[in-house]
């Protein structure tokens, strides 16, 4: 019985290797013919080569020869570029081609093919940028750096893209800030805050962005940072949701200090999915030194339950604030939000 199982196993292995060899052979025939063809005939032969090489790769993934791997990468890139140029970045085949390329990458892949893969990532990134899919575009630019044999040109491209996105949003933030101050338009100031945050999302060290955002925090302290209500030209949701993080909004129209005590008039709007049970200990102020001071039980919370899409005006009292107040926080264990002072 053991001999029978061994024979069956060996037979299956031979059959698998034979199929793989046959697939590779058919792929090579199509590959060589494609080198001499042009136009539609060339594309059809490249497609045929790609299909057979893919079958050969799948048939014995642990025993892939150097030539097979490189030709498969070459034909996959040719197919992917053709689909992108003649179609769009929305084509369903493109993610499959990327999966194929990722699975085939190894030290055996020729440097020029690795750079071609990086070039394709840049081409696909540009298409995503043109369609406002910024998050995907940035991911592909980053991918180009990782897959390239010579990453330096792609690093420069990455720096250029990030700098351009940060600059555009910083300039918009400055314009909205100046208009907001001149026209006493608090919606413009909220838009400016959003754009300054977006500039720093792309480049946390962008010159002047942190200082502008600090000024905007101070200018917007009395208002809800309701980006959803005032920002019309939003980036794609993967990025937007990282800026528009809070579903509970705070506004602080008045703050008074007396020694270590602080009294804050706080407006709170519940845009979350659930009612909130208000408790003084869930509110705190954090000073510039990182000291946390929770609200006193003498605070006036206005109501016990804050329903969805409702607001409340509260008087919060704190008795242990030392340095300059950095932010007011609300944390009930499930929901968190904050209002930054500077």
Image: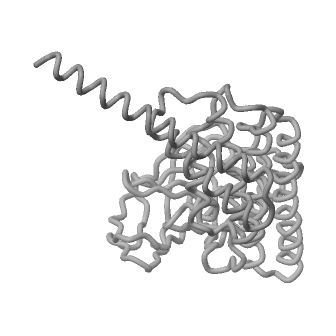
User: How many numbered marks appear?
Assistant: 0
Q: Residue at x 78, y 58 (%)?
A: 37
Where residue 115 sits: x, y (%)? 80, 40
Question: Image check: 277 left or right of 3?
Answer: right
Q: Report the colour scheme.
A: one colour
Residue extending farthest top: 3
In which quarter of the view is residue 306 placed?
bottom left
Residue 201 shows in this picture = no
Q: Say above or below: 86 vs 4.
A: below
Name which residue lies at 55% across and 55% down.
Answer: 96
Which one is nearer the viewer's eye here, 130 or 2? 2
Q: Nearer the viewer, residue 225 or 318?
A: 225
Residue drawn at point x = 83 percent, y = 42 percent:
154
Rendering coords of residue 230 (x, y %): 67, 79
Quadrant for the C terminus, please: bottom right
In the rendered image of this protein, does residue 306 appear above or below residue 46?
below
**Relative to 161, residue 244 above or below:** below
Q: Quadrant of residue 280?
A: bottom left
User: How far across and how far down the image is residue 136, in percent?
Assistant: 66, 58
Q: Quadrant of the N terminus?
A: top left
Q: Position of residue 99 (x, y in %)?
A: 56, 48
């Amino acid at each position: 019985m053991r001999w029978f199982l061994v024979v069956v196993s060996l037979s299956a292995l031979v059959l698998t290797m034979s199929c793989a060899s046959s697939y590779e052979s058919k792929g090579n025939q199509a590959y060589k013919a494609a080198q001499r063809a042009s136009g539609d005939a060339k594309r059809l032969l490249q497609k045929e080569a790609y299909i057979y090489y893919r079958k050969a790769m799948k048939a014995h993934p642990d025993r892939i020869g150097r030539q097979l791997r490189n030709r498969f990468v070459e034909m996959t890139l040719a197919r992917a570029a053709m689909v992108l140029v003649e179609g769009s970045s929305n084509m369903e085949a493109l993610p499959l081609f990327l999966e194929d390329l990722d699975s085939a990458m190894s030290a055996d892949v020729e440097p020029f093919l690795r750079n071609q893969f990086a070039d394709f990532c840049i081409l696909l990134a540009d298409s995503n940028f043109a369609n406002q899919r910024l998050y995907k575009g940035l991911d592909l630019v980053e991918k180009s750096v990782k897959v390239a044999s010579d990453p330096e040109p792609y690093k420069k491209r990455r720096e250029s893209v990030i700098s351009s996105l940060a600059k555009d949003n910083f300039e918009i933030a400055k314009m909205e800030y100046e208009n907001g101050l001149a026209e006493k338009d608090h919606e413009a100031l909220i838009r400016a805050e959003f754009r300054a945050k977006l500039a720093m999302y792309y480049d946390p060290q962008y010159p002047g962005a942190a200082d502008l955002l600090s000024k905007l925090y101070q200018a917007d302290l009395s208002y809800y940072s309701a980006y959803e209500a005032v920002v019309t030209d939003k980036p794609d949701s993967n990025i937007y949701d990282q800026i528009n993080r809070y579903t509970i909004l705070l506004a602080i129209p008045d703050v008074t200090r007396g020694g270590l005590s602080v009294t804050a008039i706080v407006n709170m709007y519940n845009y979350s999915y659930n009612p909130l049970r208000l408790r003084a200990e869930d509110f705190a102020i954090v000073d510039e030194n990182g000291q946390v001071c929770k609200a006193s039980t003498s605070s006036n919370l206005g109501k016990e339950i804050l329903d969805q899409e409702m607001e409340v005006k509260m008087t919060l009292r704190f008795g242990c604030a030392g340095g300059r107040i950095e932010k007011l926080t609300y944390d009930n264990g499930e929901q968190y939000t904050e209002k930054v002072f500077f």
